[in-house]
Amino acid sequence: MAVPGQQNGDFLYALSCCLNDLGGVPKALVPDNLKSAVIRADRYEPQTRAWMTLPIITKCQ
């Protein structure tokens, strides 16, 4: 899916559309050092942005 950029809103929209298309949500989402999601990279304990712990509720078009 192409989105305008890698801003938080663009990432959340693309992620919610992906999960909607898959028909569910996994127990955990592990971002691969995506700048929109990760504040400080670490192999074992990455520091993620606060919105990574919130439920994703959006409508995909």
Image: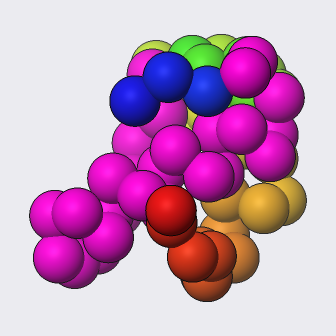
Q: Name the residue at 65% across, 51% down.
A: 12
Instruction: Tell me, yes or no, if residue 45 can be seen here.
Output: yes
Which x, y percent locates residue 24? 22, 78
Residues rendered magenta in the picture: 4-32
The image quadrant of residue 4 is top right
Q: Nearer the viewer, residue 34 or 3?
A: 3
Quick check: is 7 in the magenta stretch? yes
Q: Is residue 31 above or below residue 48?
A: above
6 on left or right of 2: right
Q: Is residue 25 left or right of residue 45?
A: left
Res 57 → quadrant: bottom right
Q: Is residue 2 left or right of residue 55?
A: left
Say left or right for 50 vs 25: right
Instruction: Please state the horizontal and vertical placement of residue 22, each as a whole percent of the image.
Output: 16, 64
Residue occupying the point 80% across, 46% down: 9
Q: Position of residue 19 (x, y in %)?
A: 32, 63
Q: Quadrant of the N terminus?
A: top left
Residue at horizontal 32 percent and vertical 70 percent from the top: 20
